[in-house]
Amino acid sequence: MTKQLLKTALVLAALAVGTLAQAQTAPSAGPGGASASAPPSAFEKAVQQAKKPTDWLSLGADIRVRNEYYDTIVTLNENDSLSEQDVIRYRGRIWAAITPVTGLSLNTRVSAEPRGWMKPAFVGAYKAQSGMEWRYGIADILNVKWTNAFNQPLSITAGRQDIMLGDFYDWWLVADGTPGDGSWTFFLDSLRLTYEAKDIKTKFDVMYIYQNARPGEWMPTINSSGPTTSNPLGYNLTEQNEQGVIAYVSNKSLKATTIDGYFIYKRDAREFSSPPYPPNFGDNADIYTIGAKITGTPAERWQYSVEGAYQFGTKEDTINDGVSGAARLANRDINAYGGKAKLTYLFKDRLNNQVSLLGEFLSGDDPNTPGKDEMFDVLWGRWPRWSELYIYSYVNETSRKIAQMNNLGRFGPAWSLSPMKNMTLSATYNLMFAPESVPTRTVAPGRFSNDGNFRGHYVQAILKHQFNKHLSGHLWGEFVWEGDYYAQRDLMTFVRAEVMFTF
């Protein structure tokens, strides 16, 4: 861990001590021993007044500071000159919701995330440089929402919005339309219609998505996000222009059970293909996905979730045999599938102990079927759903696309508890495999053995604390001991300290 990371961790600890010291005293007992809430402080009154200055306007803001240190997770070789990374990410956001009439709102949010590189950066936009990377500002929410439209249980949201489908914080195929900027923004430029048929306990969603690869393509960014002298590639939200249609149905007719079914169509149109852009950057594709999910609580203290999907269609991208590095552009038929499952037991004790067993399978491309593409595509699910570390390892494995996870089988236990109020501690272990030993989209064949199916041992540990309603933080660590799927057998490391203030 670098000195800068240690400094950030010390700041986090100091904030914790200061916040606890200044915390309000426990509510006093009222008549009959009942608890009486303490009156809000002058600061809290000022905050609430500033956030809601009028009945028709709501305001908010937050700032997140992350110090991230990682080693080997991109290069897959600890001897590479850019293997070790140390970066501080400063994300600030301000937002507003305007409600001129009941049921109609205009929602907007502006976000920016400059980054300070303590070591030369691995990313193409700031390759092999250290120092401050100011980036740009962007409106990552700008939409109009109409609820109870036409006096029906119908809501319509048009414009730039966040869309996450599936289990909370385990959104599988629809969550992040902007994987190119990391976890800075998540938005999708889209039209969404949601109808609540309460008499049959069913919710219907229909969505249309039109996503541009460039940050400033649809609306201008604050400062340039395009190519410059110091950044000839410019920035990208994703590697291709994307359109899509989603039909999603969720039913709760069965007791303690939710059944979801969905159809997703995604059309990719390559945006970056000629110099100075790197090869293998962007796809042309028509991907059709049919899937279903069932979640429930079959007995007290037990929870489960099972989801699966099948994909077909066509995709044109650059593939190779994974050994010689000889690449070719190919248009092939898709025949892929994936699934995930989780079973959880809640102890419901004083420490809120919970244990889970989880697994996931994403098919990989078989190099022995040249006319077919068996690689599962996670669509708009390219975000750190279960690992902040492992999404980076796919950069050299899958045509320089971060978080384009596929060819993966993983399973293992997870455990969490609350050692004190507003604090959680969790740990996860995964045994990871590759169904296919040859990564057919690799841009670095020498990083893979091409003769092994064991990806390695994955370990994660997270400590989170909510100091008060405005301040939170966490310490996060992940490690992968590489298996024979890789050529080097090195240790991948990811460590992060975060502080977040919400206004």
Image (spheres, grey):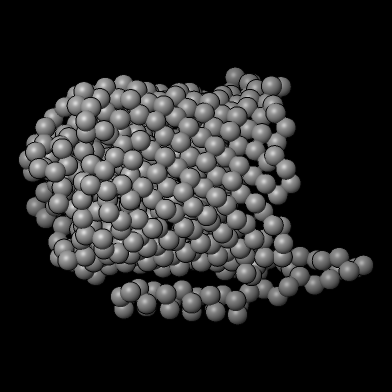
Rendered residue at 59%/46% (across/down):
343
Left or right? Give the position of 302 relative to 463: right
> In front here: 428 or 176?
428
* Residue 21 appearing in the image: yes
Residue 342 falls in image quadrant: top right
Number of numbered discs overlaid on the protein picture: 0
Q: Residue at x 56, y 59 (%)?
A: 415
Examine the rendering and report whether any part of residue 108 can be seen: no
Frontmost residue, 107 versus 500: 500
In the image: residue 483, left or right of residue 47: left
Going by the image, does 470 lie left or right of 152?
left
Seen in the picture, residue 254 relative to 477 is either above or below; the reply is above
User: Where is residue 460 shown, x and y percent of the image?
Assistant: 44, 61
Residue pictured at 46% horizontal, 73% vertical = 12
- The residue lying toward the viewer, choosing from 183 and 222, is 183
Decide: is 462 above or below 339.
below
Percent position (x, y) of residue 73?
28, 58
Residue 362 placement (x, y as % from top left): 38, 38
Vertical placement of residue 40 versus 413, above or below: below
**Front-most of residues 131 and 343:** 343
Q: Is residue 383 left or right of residue 297?
A: left
Q: Residue furthest right?
A: 32
